[in-house]
Image (cartoon, helix red, strand yellow):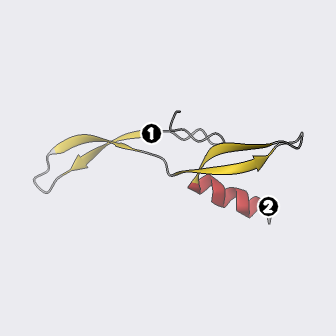
Amino acid sequence: MAKRCMISGKGPNVANHVSHAHNKNKKRQMPNLRTVRVTLEDGTTRKIKVAASELRTMKKKNS
């Protein structure tokens, strides 16, 4: 399964790992995904992968 947030669409990012000698190597930064159960409008529950930053936003909107 893809490492992508089902709500925001966040996915892997490419960046440089820079050493003390300023050597640059490519690295992938993965989103912080969590599996959560969500209740849909029709009453069914489903597991989806959501970024942790998106979970904080969802909690803020619900309270």
Is label 2 in a helix, a strand or a loop?
helix
55 sits to left or right of 2: right
Q: Please state which amino acid type lies under the numbered disc 2.
A: Asn
Q: Residue at x 71, y 50 (%)?
A: 37
Residue 5 percent coordinates (x, y): 59, 42
Q: Please state which amino acid type lies under the numbered disc 1.
A: Pro
Pick out the residue farthest to the right.
42
Residue 61 percent coordinates (x, y): 77, 59
Q: Residue at x 67, y 57 (%)?
A: 57
Residue 3 percent coordinates (x, y): 50, 38
Q: Relative to the observer, which residue lies in front, 38 or 16?
A: 38
Is label 1 in a helix, a strand or a loop?
loop
Residue 36 percent coordinates (x, y): 66, 51
Vertical position of residue 31 compared to residue 20: above or below? above
Residue at numbered disc 1: 12
Vertical position of residue 55 compared to residue 31: above or below? below
Residue at numbered disc 2: 62
34 sits to left or right of 63: left
